């Protein structure tokens, strides 16, 4: 399955086969997604990637588009996206996709984020802007926008296994909420480990002059979680599905404000919970 | 009960709100948590928490019930005088119309 023109990955327990005539793209991807390379799996998703020159793209990488332009037609299962120098189409029902792009660090990665945000809905699960890690066999999630301290937490925590410093994958399985490592990184520029475990707690980051945690209500947790959910299309049924998933999640997982100083001592108050 | 005239609605004129029915925006979702409605605009993830009276109003917004009937229910269920009930109801609905969470219709909404 893994050749110079194809690469099989498994992210969040969902296998995806990347196929391209560009050996350069496959080689780059093999390096980037090294923790997530899989063998001997039947791919659930297959993506054909066409690498083109920048002049062949309708939307160039430098057009300044800051938000992805995603669509999803539930009746056909077809989703499309145009963003940062790439265009892609994905058939949710068949699990097949095609993308065209110029070799650009954001291209394939962005398309994978887009596809996973859609396909996770029926797992059910979702992607959230959050760093996540495992420490002492317990999994912690730290949502936040850029600058909130997600990468900092990953960097300063001793003896941890990083799941992601930017984009965390969560599935709700039976009565459990499971967090999975992802290759979707932030400033740390290192992919997470391909492991998963039950979520111990969710901590909303607040930079402060002292370290302490404060338990928050379901309502407060829902309010803070929703703006951090990663989803690229405006489609009512999907949005409602996401809202219900988030509601289930915050009902099952204890949520806190984490007021913190950027130093390892912050773990004193988390470990005390 | 007096009809309420409500200014500043996105219809460019004065409305007799009591004679209208109210409908939820399709791009929102809500849950009742601890007796209070939590309404989220799915377009921008903006979060609105409603107090118990507003939650009661919210639960009666179905695209069929006229505002005057909701006012009447508030007055009886919360033992509030009709004028106060009307004022509270109209203010709440007007605010949510301005926030694009609700829309007004002169006739009951037909399901598509």
Image (spheres, coloured by chain):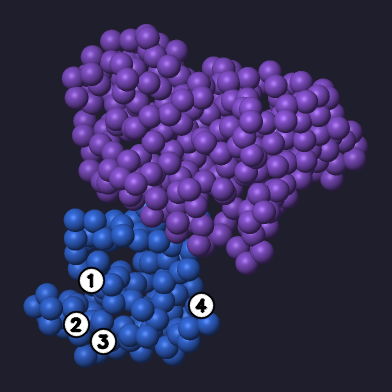
| Quarter of the image where the C terminus of chain A is located | top left
Residue topped by disc 4: B12
Looking at the image, do the residues carrying marks 2 and 3 touch, with CB atoms under 8 Å apart?
yes
Asked which secondary structure carries label 3, the reply is: helix
Q: Which residue is mark 1?
A: B56
Circles 4 and 3 in contact, beta carbons < 8 Å? no
Which structural element holds mark 2? helix
Give the chain ID for the blue colour: B
For marks 4 and 3, the one nearer the N-term is 4
**What subunit carries mark 3?**
B
Q: CA distance from mark 1 to mark 3?
A: 13 Å
How far apart are the two marked residues, 4 and 1, measured between alpha carbons?
A: 28 Å
Subunit that carries the residue with mark 4:
B
Residue extending furthest left?
B79
Q: CA distance from mark 4 to mark 2?
A: 29 Å
Number of residues whose C-alpha sits closer than 10 Å to that of mark 1, classed few (under 14), some (14–19) or many (20 or more): some
For chain A, the rendered hue is: purple
Mark 1 falls on what kind of element?
A: helix
| Residue occupying the point 23% across, 18% down | A271
* Residue B67, above or below A174: below
- Say if residue B89 shows up in the picture: yes
Q: Earlier in the sequence, mark 1 or mark 3?
A: 1
């Amino acid at each position: 399955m893994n050749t110079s023109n194809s690469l099989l990955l498994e992210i969040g327990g969902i296998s995806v086969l990347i196929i391209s005539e560009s050996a350069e793209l496959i080689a780059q991807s093999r390096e980037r997604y090294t923790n997530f390379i899989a063998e001997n799996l039947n791919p659930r998703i297959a993506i054909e990637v066409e690498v083109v020159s920048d002049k062949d793209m309708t939307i160039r990488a430098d057009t300044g588009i800051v938000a992805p332009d995603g669509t999803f037609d539930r009746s056909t299962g077809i989703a499309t996206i145009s963003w940062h120098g790439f265009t892609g189409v994905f058939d949710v029902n068949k699990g097949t996709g095609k993308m065209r792009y110029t070799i650009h660090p954001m291209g394939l990665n962005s398309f994978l984020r887009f596809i996973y945000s859609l396909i996770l809905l029926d797992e059910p699960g979702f992607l959230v802007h959050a760093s996540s890690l495992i420490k002492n066999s317990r999994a912690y999630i730290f949502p936040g926008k850029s600058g909130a301290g997600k990468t900092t937490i990953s960097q300063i925590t001793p003896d941890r296994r990083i799941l992601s410093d930017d984009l965390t994958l969560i599935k709700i399985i039976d009565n459990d909420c499971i967090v999975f490592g992802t290759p979707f990184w932030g400033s740390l520029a290192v992919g997470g480990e391909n492991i998963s475990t039950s979520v111990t707690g969710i901590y909303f980051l607040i930079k402060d002059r002292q370290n302490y945690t404060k338990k928050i209500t379901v309502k407060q947790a829902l309010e803070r979680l929703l703006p951090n959910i990663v989803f690229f299309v405006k489609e009512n049924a999907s949005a409602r599905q996401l809202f219900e998933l988030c509601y289930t999640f915050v009902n099952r997982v204890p949520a806190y404000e984490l007021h913190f100083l950027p130093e390892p001592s912050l773990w004193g108050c988390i470990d005390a919970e | 009960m007096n009809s309420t005239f409500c200014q500043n609605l996105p219809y460019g004129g004065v409305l007799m709100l009591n004679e209208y029915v109210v409908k939820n925006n399709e791009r929102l979702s809500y849950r009742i948590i601890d007796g209070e409605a939590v309404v989220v605009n799915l377009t921008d993830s903006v979060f609105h928490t409603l107090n118990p009276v507003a939650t009661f109003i919210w639960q009666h917004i179905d695209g069929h019930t006229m505002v005057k009937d909701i006012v009447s229910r508030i007055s009886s269920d919360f033992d509030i005088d009709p004028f106060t009930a009307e004022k509270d109801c109209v203010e709440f609905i007007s605010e949510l119309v301005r926030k694009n969470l609700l829309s007004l219709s002169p006739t009951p909404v037909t399901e598509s």
